[in-house]
Amino acid sequence: MQLDPQLRALLASIRRRVRHYIVVDATLAIIALVLLAFWFGLAVDYLPVRLGGTEMPRSARAILLLGLAVGVLALAGKLLWSRLRTPLRDDSLALLLERQHPELGGRLVTAVQLTQPLRRGDAHEPSLLGRVHSEAVAASESLKSNRIFRFEPLLRKAWVVGPLGVAAIVFALLSPNQFARAAGRLLLLSDSPWPRQAMLSMVGVELPSVTADENDVAPPSLVPFENKTLRLPQGSSGALRVTARADDAVVPDVCTVYYTTGGGTRGQANMRRVGRVVDGNQAFILDGPPLAGLTESVWISVRGLDARLDDFRIEAVPPPAITSMQIVSTDPDYLRPSDKVPPTTRISEYQSGLRIREGSRVELVAKSTVVLGNVDVRLLRGNEDNATTGAIIDSDGKGFRILIENMRQPATVVVVPADATGITTQLPYRYFLGVIIDDEPEIEMRLRGIGTAVTPIARIPILGMATDDYGIESATIELNGIQPTPADDATVEPQENGIATLEAPAPGSVSKMPIAPDRDGKFETYVDLRELAEQKKFIVPEPAKSGENPAVNLFGELSDRYNLAGRHQVKSELFRLEIVTADRLLALLERRELALRARLEQTIDETRGLRDSLDSIRRDVSQTDASPGAPDSALPAAQPEGGSDENKGETDARIEQITRLRAQQNGLQASKTSDELSGIAASLDDLLMEMQNNRVDSVDRRERIGMGVRDPLRAIVAGDLAKLREQIRAIEMVTADRTAVAEKSGQAVQTAEDVLLQLTAVLEKMLDLESYNEILDMVRELIENQDGLLDETKKEQKRNVLDLFE
């Protein structure tokens, strides 16, 4: 038996309506979830903006969108897919109707179950089944199928979807741009910000420009953000710049920067307005922390009214640093010993106070910590301030070279390296290079045993010192003969035309002789006028018989190998030597002997005074106790008997002090006498050497001056006079003992007497020499008078001859 078509249609209608119910319920649930997510996302994304915050970040929006998708799929799977996949059997639907319609009394379920074609094992009466079946068909006509559905869940979902959907439609109709912006931000993850009362724009960071040229005041450079990130060198102090729209938005009174450093430090700082509105924008600037002295990376956000700039990062990167600087200097040519020797190259690490030889070729070789993109270099030296020089960057970019040709004066090399991105050091590197200036050579000369006048056959000994810091190229002694200019009253010879003229003086002769200093620069040589004249290397001027004598100029000339700017040529002191006859020279020397005799006489007088002073000390000390208060005593009188011990002690101390003072004065006088006698002996030695060098000496003269005067003086100084000084020094040591003072004073007086006797003998020897010299002067005068008489006779004869022709 089959189920009645009416009952089958009833069950099919209920099955279809159940499926529609499932679809509507699931759809309302999904729409409610979408609308709830939309309005929730809109609130979370937009309301903070109205409160001065920022929009929901993309990551949060992506999480929300992902959660929505997961929720929709979960609802679709649970409320739609799984329920639609569940089979709705006829007996289940019949049982559902039986529950809502008890009056059926189980007839519908029985009819459905017993009419199933595959059902087996049931025992029933067919007539009874037919009757139940017909009763079920009759009862189905009055059934109300809607009673099996619960519409409260649908209504609850509709109450959620309806207002939210209507609100969404109204939002879309009233503000389609904002609805599209919301949909784009929530569904398409767009970063288009919500409109605000204020509108801020990030400009970037102004960084002071660091250049090697101190005179070039370059404007600060603007470093913009790229993808909300920029890189600044550590230690820099930049200024953050932000602009606010002023034409169609509200300008904030203040903009606040919220920052977080890489170390976790949080803080905020207010930006200040700069100037007025320009091109519809108001500028704000922050030139303090956290950008002042930047040491670590910083994350910043800027807030002004409801506008906000978020997630900007400033990376603090190490600036380029020069790790090493080598100075490679190549010596100039003038320091080379010869052209065959290559120039010397020196390599040294830079250090303060480093000096380079003048004229050297200098190369600065530097190494950097990063790959360099550019190196700004300025060379400051002398008057060439801010002279630009180039730097050659190595192929690997980790170093550079700076070349300075012909370094002549101290220089300062200012270097500012920059990496490939343009980040520079915040302070220029300065390298100070000094210069060792090549000094001019120095030459000193002195003549030994030669005065200001020489004979034409003199031998002139020369001692000297010739030095240079890097070596001498040439050293010579130059000898120039100088003829005197005729005096105004010079004798003139009348010419045939009756005009009187003077003969022109002969040109001075010049001779140069090389000198060879030793390793220490010392040299010793001589100039032999007689030898030069014999070899015809120099014309020695003849001494004048009357009037001014000719002369020779003698000086040393020195030059080194310096060739950068001219030559270094120096001359020594000029020695002007008058050429005189032997007799004239001896006369000059005799005058010097007279001066030495006068000095000796004065020294003898001073020695007498020394003796008298020593004798007075002896007498005063001896008379102090014997006759106190004697009128000739230089010491205070001793305390009379009965005087106090205190007064007596004061008097003794005073006597001791005065005695020591007088002994010291005598010691100084003895030292002076010794020095004076040594000077006289040295002067006599010079006289002997001068006569020897001028070749006018004789054995007799040498013995009379040397053995008769000079040697005795030196013996006196080394003998009795030295003994006298020791005795005076002994007196100073025993001033407290009057007996010892008297004894040693007497010994000193006796020694002074011996010195006087010896000096007097030397003086008498010098007087004998003076008498001998006076005889020689008389002979020279007779010879000169004779020569003068002969000249006058010749002139008179010549005049007589000329008168005959007139």
Image (cartoon, rainbow, N blue to C red):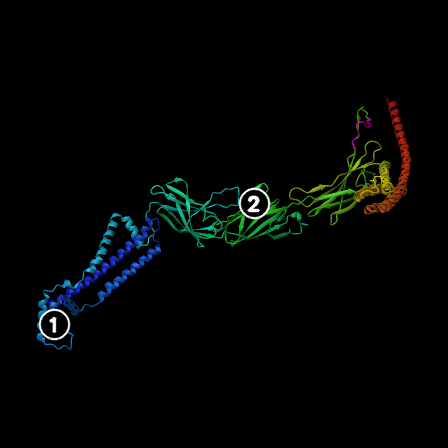
Asked whether 490 falls inside the magenta stretch, the response is yes
Q: Quadrant of the C terminus?
A: top right
Left or right of 396? Residue 195 is left
Labels 1 and 2: the sequence-earlier one: 1
Q: What stretch is highlighted in magenta?
A: 484-493
On screen, 432 above or below 150? above
Callout 1, which amino acid?
Answer: Gln
Q: Residues within 10 Å of mark 1 (few under 14, many from 20)?
A: few
Residue that lies at the very extreme toward the top in this rendered image: 806
Looking at the magenta stretch, what is its main secondary structure?
loop
On screen, 300 above or below 15? above
Where's residue 211, x and y in %? 51, 45
Q: Residues within 10 Å of mark 2 (few under 14, many from 20)?
A: many
- Who is closer to the viewer here, 704 or 663? 663
Left or right of 432? Residue 574 is right
Name which residue lies at 82% across and 31% down: 547
Callout 2, which amino acid?
Answer: Leu
- Dot 2: what SS? strand
Where's residue 352, x and y in %? 60, 49
How far apart, in angstroms, are the residues tagged by discs 1 and 2? 115 Å
- Which mark, residue 2? 1
Q: Quadrant of the N terminus?
A: bottom left
- Dot 1: what SS? loop
Asked whether 286 falls inside the magenta stretch, the response is no
